[in-house]
Amino acid sequence: MSYKNFPMVSKVVFGRGSFNQLSEILAPKRLSMNAPFIYIIDDVFKNNQWLTSRIPLAYDDKILFISTEEEPKTSQVDAIVEDIILTTKELPSGIIGIGGGSVLDLAKAVSIMLTNEGEAKDYQGWDLVKHPAIYHVGIPTISGTGAEVSRTTVLIGPEKKLGINSDFTPFDQVILDSELTKDVPKNQWFYTGMDCYIHCIESLKGTYLNTFSETYGNMSLELCKEIFLDNNLTAEESEEKLMMASWHGGMSIAYSQVGVAHAMSYALAYVLGVKHGIGNCIVFDHLEEFYPEGVKLFKAMKEKHNIMLPQGICADLSDADFDKMTTIALNLVPLWENALGKNWKQIITPKKLKELYQKM
Ligand code: NAD
Ligand code: ZN
């Protein structure tokens, strides 16, 4: 038996208003006047002075505003990397991602691809990255995905939606300032928050469970219940707690795996472009069979917050689409093995999976 040896985020700041310390955190990391800091920021902040006025631009530093309409693609990473290489005199001093899971993943991927040859799609998988990434910083503005703490960056490639999982992927620095999440729209708050809740359930109910994952998972789950069910927190407390729930949920799956909901929603994302948070909710709503208690609680949270999930999203799909979706989902072997055990193929067949999709 050989145990996995995982890197973690090297430095983390936690606190309301800690975003103000960005300048002092970055200053010692500037390699030269010609090596800029590149900020990759969700374009929802484009005209937001409250946030952008605090970004300490100097020399050739620049901001790239990114639309998160669609999930990040390998081709998008390649284009950003090429643009940076063509327009900077030296390799950047650092890449700073400010946004949700989409932007954090883009920042991680760009920092990796600046020092590794070829195209981002060549690195989708496990431990394919050869050279350390450029110094990279993650600053979440919405909580739930755990992307701020994870060892992966999930990208849609020409053939699959899969992460670049590597020892070089985790951030060198994370800034957890819950104030940055104060304007997240309610529905999105729920969807991305539920990503965290689902990480907990899939980890805690999985066959890969161990004490490392279990302790983080339990902490995160308790926080999710406080936030989404109990309802006696101030907005500030709730934002802070969700930020930590996301972190602990990410830590929990680091040493285990996600499960049925993620396998199925990855395929939905690939074939229909359904985004991760809402896709997980649509799927999880129909998974009583696999996670009876988890789904019951999910439905209670959904009701409490008056969330209406889209229905019938698979209604017009062709058999070819269903085949594609079931194939993509079933290819995610570790997720099924974690969820259902070594004999998972006897429990979940293409036919059964298709029937589940048809309900959604
Ligand atoms: P997201 O980053 O797509 O953001 C969701 C929406 O919220 C966007 O419209 C965005 O503009 C908006 N938003 C973000 N911050 C805001 C703020 N402060 N105020 C107002 N609006 C704000 O969504 P997400 O759910 O955070 O991330 C989903 C992505 O994360 C997917 O691409 C998924 O694959 C990835 N993911 C990665 C990991 C990982 O470990 N790397 C884990 C889970 C999910
Ligand atoms: Zn997730």
Image (spheres, rainbow, N blue to C red):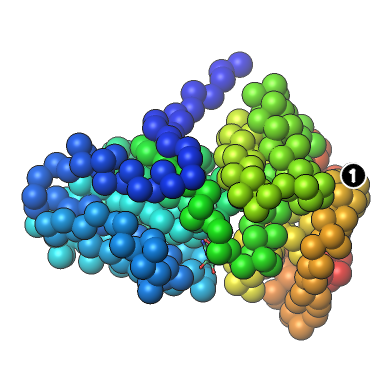
Q: Does residue 321 appear in this view? A: yes
Nearer-the-camera pick, 163 or 331: 163
Quadrant of the rendered structure where residue 49 is?
bottom left
Percent across and percent down for residue 126 are 48, 41
Confirm or reject: label 1 Cβ below 8 Å from ligand 2: no
Nearer-the-camera pick, 280 or 338: 280
Percent across and percent down for residue 110 are 33, 54
Q: Is residue 307 above or below residue 247?
A: below
Residue furthest to the top: 1
Quadrant of the drawing holding the C terminus: bottom right
Q: Is residue 232 left or right of residue 184?
A: right
Percent across and percent down for residue 231 are 79, 50
Q: Is residue 26 above or below residue 11?
A: below
* Residue drawn at point x = 39 percent, y = 32 percent: 11
Numbered disc 1: secondary structure: helix
Percent across and percent down for residue 326 are 72, 62
Quadrant of the drawing holding the N terminus: top right
Q: Callout 1 environment at 10 Å: few (<14), some (14 to 19), or many (20+)?
A: few
Q: Which residue is mark 1?
A: 293
Q: Is residue 156 above or below residue 339?
A: below
Q: Amino acid at mark 1?
A: Glu
Q: Is residue 73 left or right of residue 61?
A: right
Q: Is residue 338 left or right of residue 121?
A: right
* Residue drawn at point x = 62 percent, y = 67 percent: 185
* Residue drawn at point x = 74 percent, y = 60 percent: 281
Nearer-the-camera pick, 19 or 273: 19
Residue furthest to the bottom: 316
Quadrant of the rendered structure where residue 127 is?
top left
Tally of numbered discs? 1
* Residue drawn at point x = 65 percent, y = 60 percent: 189
